[in-house]
Amino acid sequence: MDPTTAWAELSTLAADTLAGRAPDPDRMAELITGIDQWTARGGHPPAQWSH
């Protein structure tokens, strides 16, 4: 799991949803869960969170 890549994809999916395009809730849930599990195991957070 690359949390930086996952966060970038999640951000794109969220922006698409806000722009009126059909969301992919399964993929969004997968990415959120993946980031959560990664950080819970001591992995670094997505780079986007550091600024």
Image (cartoon, rainbow, N blue to C red):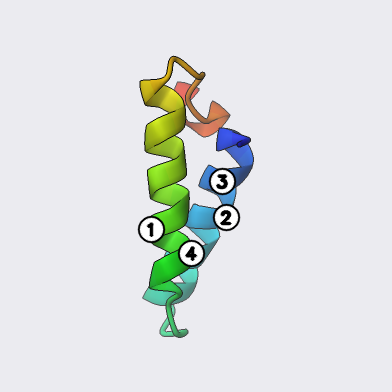
Q: Are marks 1 and 4 in contact (CB under 8 Å)?
A: yes
Asked which secondary structure carries label 2, the reply is helix
At 52% across and 44% down in the image, what residue appears? 7
Residue 38's mark? none
Q: Amino acid at mark 3?
A: Ala
Instruction: Give the labeled residue for mark 4.
Output: 27
Asked which secondary structure carries label 3, the reply is helix
Question: How far is mark 1 from mark 3, CA to CA?
Answer: 11 Å
Instruction: Give the labeled residue for mark 2.
Output: 9
Look at the picture and state if 4 lies above or below 22. Answer: above
Label 3 or label 4, whichever comes before in sequence order: 3
Instruction: Give the labeled residue for mark 3.
Output: 6
Label 1 or label 3, whichever comes before in sequence order: 3
Question: Residue 8: x percent and y percent?
Answer: 57, 48
Instruction: Give the labeled residue for mark 1.
Output: 29
Q: Residues within 10 Å of mark 1 (few under 14, many from 20)?
A: few
Q: Residues within 10 Å of mark 3 (few under 14, many from 20)?
A: some
Say whether residue 44 is visible: yes
Q: Amino acid at mark 4?
A: Arg
Q: Are marks 2 and 3 in contact (CB under 8 Å)?
A: yes
At 41% across and 84% down in the image, what residue appears? 20
Question: How far is mark 2 from mark 3, CA to CA?
Answer: 5 Å
